[in-house]
Image: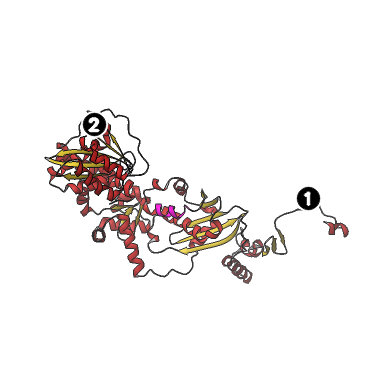
Amino acid sequence: MEHCRRKKIKVNRDKLHYKVPEVSYMGHRLTPQGMEPDPNKISEPLRQLLKKNVPYVWSDAHEKSFNVVKELVTRAPILRYYDPRIDVVLQCDASQYGLGAALIQDGKPVAYASRAMTSTEKNYVQIEKELLAIVFATQRFDQYIYGLSAVEVHTDHKPLEAILRKSINDSANRRIQRMLLRLQRYNLCVKYVPGRELWIADTLSCQLPCPRVKPGAFAIKLAEHELAIDLAVTAECLQEYQTTSSQDSELQAVVVAIRSGDWSMPAVAEYTPVKLELSTDGVLVFKGARLVVPRTLRSRVLQQLHAAHMGIEATRRRARESVFWPGLNGHIKDMVSRCSTCAAVQPSQAREPMLSHEVPVVPWTKVGMDFFEWNRQKYLVITDYTSNWFEVKELKSTSASSLVRECRVQFARHGVPLQIVAYSGTQFLSRTFHKFAEELNFEVVTSSPYHHQSNGKAENAVHTIKKLLSKSQMSNTDPLLAILEWRNTPSEATGTSPTQKLFGRRC
């Protein structure tokens, strides 16, 4: 303006644009990042062909304009420098075969990234692919976003908003849980953005770099090993499921439907309601982290689920931990209802609940103990107040010395508790047991005489064990297998099993 004043140049206020971020000048755009070709000028000859009543004649000018536009599209635009003081936005998207991501500040790109999916990743359901795109973006741009108080993530898959707000444990899909764990080191805020506005990441997910090298034998073996760990089965059992699934025409039709996206085949009609939750490794089919069982193995799986002769709801909770097929809940109900062993051993009417003991946070810090007799044999039961895990041991004698000897074995396995709750029997009141308590530094709390209900945790464990032993005897099955199944059955109140609470895994 000073220069105009010295040269006595007058400007029209209505036509003056003052302090604008960019300006067009002689076919170019002048921006803070530098000078760029004006795309409107370059594409002008092509846009003339789109007007009404204009004959479509392709000339040398059109060919030149078309080639220049292609060059601009394939050439990386100007990137801005990263500024740690400015908020960061991650654009993430997944196509059928690739992942794309862009790091954005003030609406301008700082960096781009894309890669092709592996053959295993291509079998993921769409929600897993979209979450994988976020994991890929955070790992690629880790040096920019790690330690930031907030990083806004834009995705065109709306369900991810809710998934990343919930606890990891709220997701039943083991694969999603693993990916969420990898995102825990970042402070992410996921925001849904329509796909038409996510054009950078969308383009990158389709414009892929060179194909990835096919995984070698070691990578394939590692993937199979991880799959066996997730399913908590032996390699031999996994091989049996793979062989049977490959021969099951219905499951193979589901595999084709997952990969093609075409669910119009009659053979997959039962799976259509849960199609968004299904994934495949090419042979096996999964609903989340649960294995879809082939038809020929379903009867055997039902027998395994009901090995402990638990009720309908408990058996269903056990099934929801690992397996799935259409109509599974109904099949469990029919099987339990027809079970003669369960019908013969019906639970008695429950009493009014009493005030509960304080339940510690750490497992095996407070345990209950009790003796019981079944089938003319004496047993000791030790149950954990936190996890409900119990140990049961057949004893030749219920003397104080036998009690101390078995406690040493169990404490060597699980650790010494801080407190033991037991009924007021002579064994627990004896000098031998109290000397043992002083030696290992734990507290002994005994129940009131003639009121064993105050030792309700151990009493309840005794009731459960007797029921398992009776049902196993009637059905001529292994009682240890029944105890194993009970330990792996999720609680109705917490949704987790005693094994998971005590050991953090299934067994």
Instruction: State the residue in front, 96 or 487.
Output: 487
At mark 2, the secondary structure is helix
Task: Check the picture and name the quadrant holding the N terminus.
Answer: bottom right
Q: How is the image coloured?
A: secondary structure
**Mark nearer the N terminus (2 vs 1):** 1
Pick the residue in front: 406 or 92.
Answer: 406
Three-letter amino acid code at the position of disc 1: Asp
- Which residue lies under the disc numbered 2? 452
**The magenta stretch spans residue 182:** yes
Q: Examine the rendered structure and indicate whether residue 440 appears above or below residue 251.
A: above
Question: Of tags 2 and 1, which is closer to the observer?
Answer: 2
Q: Is residue 80 magenta?
A: no
**Residue 219 showing in the rendered view:** yes
Residue 329 in sight = no
38 left or right, relative to 252: right
Query: Disc 2 marks which amino acid?
Result: His
Please give the range of residues in magenta.
177-185
Label 1 element class:
helix
Q: Please give the name of the residue rendered at 54% of the width and 52% of the height, measured from the top-left corner.
A: 151
Are there few (<14), some (14-19), or many (20+) residues within 10 Å of tag 2?
some
Residue 134 percent coordinates (x, y):
48, 55
Q: Are marks 2 and 1 in contact (CB under 8 Å)?
A: no
Q: Which residue is mark 1?
A: 14
Residue 343 coordinates in the image, percent (x, y): 16, 37
Magenta span: helix, strand or loop, mainly? Answer: helix
